[in-house]
Image: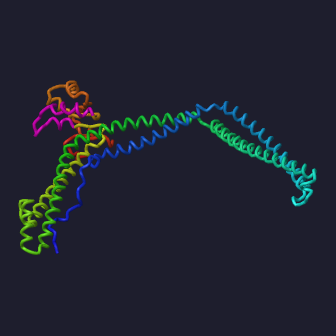
Amino acid sequence: MSQSVINPWEEPLTPPDDEEFNPLCKDLSNLRRRLADLEKQERELAAELDRYRKTDANQLETQLREVESNAAQLRTSLASLQKQLEGLQVRLKQTEAQLVAKWNPLYWLDPQQRRLRQEWKTLRQEILRLTAARERAMADLQLADEAIGRIRGILDWHRAFDVRTLEEQLCQLREEIQCLREQEQNLQIRSDRVEKALQPLLEKMSEIWQKIEHCRQQLEVAQRLEDRLLRAANPHTKARIHRECEKKFGESKPRLVLRELNRRCADLRREYAKLCERASTIGRRMARKIDKLIVDGCNLCFENGAFIGLAVLKALVPKLTEQCKVIIVFDASIRGRLKTGNNKILQDLQPADVHIVPKHTQADETILVLAREEPTTFILTNDRFKNY
C-alpha cells in the first residue's frame, strides 16, 4: 500500500482579498445598505406626497356626485325592467296555458290558436330583449358602485392625509440621507487609504500564493510518480519512472522530490501567514477612526537621546492635520531647549493646536485630560503612563 510523503497540511489557500484585511469594507457595505433603504423610503414618501398634491378633491367630489346620480338612474331603470319582465312572464304563462298541444288539429286550424302562437313568440322575444337590457344595466351598476367605492376611498385618504407630519418625516429622512452620504464619502476616503497601504503586501501575498499553488501542482505530479513506482511490476518499469521524474524535476527519486517540495511549500505558507498577520495589523490600525490626536511633543524632539528640535514635528504636522485634529503638548522646558518663546513654537507648528504646560506641571497630566475617554482620540507618545 502506498504511503504518501505529502504532508497533509492545511486546506488550499484562497487568493488574497483586500476586503479580508480592510475592516472598513464591511462598514462601507453596511452603510450603503442602510443608505439604500433610506433612499427607498424617501422615494416612497415623496411619491405619496406628490400623489396627494396632484389629487383634486373638488374634482373627485364632482365626479362622485355624477357617478352616484348615474347609479341611482341605473337602479331606477333596473327596477322598471324587472317590473316589465315580471308582467311579461305572467302574460307568457297565461298565453302558454291557452295553447293546445301540437297533435291537436285545432293547433293548426283554429285562427285563435294561430294568434296565441304569434303572441307567445312576441312575448318571448320581448322577454329576451328586456333580460339582456337588465344584464347590461346590472353590469353598468356594478361598475358604477366600484367607481363610487374607489372615489370615496381616495377622498377619505385625502381628507385624512397629514401633510405636515409627512413633510417633517421627509425632511428628517433627507437630512439623515445627506449625513449618511457624507459618512459614506469620508469612509470611502479612509477605505481607499487603507487599500493603498495594503496594496504592496497584497501583491506580495498574491505572488506567494501563486508559488504555493504551483508547488501543490508539482506535489501532485511527484506523488503520482511515487505511487506508480511503488506499483511497478519490474525493474524496467521502475527505471522508466525514474527517468521521467529526473526529466521533470532534475531528481530521479520521487520521494526526495516530495520531501523537497513539502519543505518549500511549508516555507512559503509560513511566509504567507506572516504577511497575512502583518496585513491584518496594518488594516486594523489604519481603519481606526481618529478624530483627534494628542502628541507628546517632547518625545518627538529627541532621537537616540539627542535633542533634535522641531524637525520631526514640522514634517509630521502637515500630514497629520489632513486627517484629524492635532494637539501637541510640551513641557515648559521646551522654551529653554529651543531658546525661543511660545509664539515662535506656535507659528512653526501651525495648523496644529499647541499647549505648553506651566512650570512644575507634568505634560502627561495635560495629555490625559485632553484625551479623556473619547474612543476616537489617540495619544502619540513613547511614555507608558504607568503612574496613571
Residue at coordinates 45% horizontally, 34% vertically from top-left?
175
- Between 226 and 345, the residue placed more toward the observer is 226
Residue at coordinates 9% horizontally, 67% vertically from top-left?
241
Type of colouring: rainbow
Taking the image as drawn, is residue 370 in sight? Answer: no
Specify the quadrant of the image occupied by residue 362: top left
Residue 358, above or below 20: above
Q: Is residue 387 magenta?
A: no
Which span of residues is magenta-colored?
296-322
Q: Is residue 320 magenta?
A: yes
Q: Which quarter of the figure is the N terminus placed in?
A: bottom left
Taking the image as drawn, is residue 175 in sight? Answer: yes
Return the x and y of residue 87 as percentages of the image width and height. 87, 48
- Between 6 and 10, the residue placed more toward the observer is 6
Return the x and y of residue 134 as percentages of the image width and height. 77, 45
Return the x and y of residue 335 as percentages of the image width and height. 17, 29
- Between 191 and 59, the residue placed more toward the observer is 59
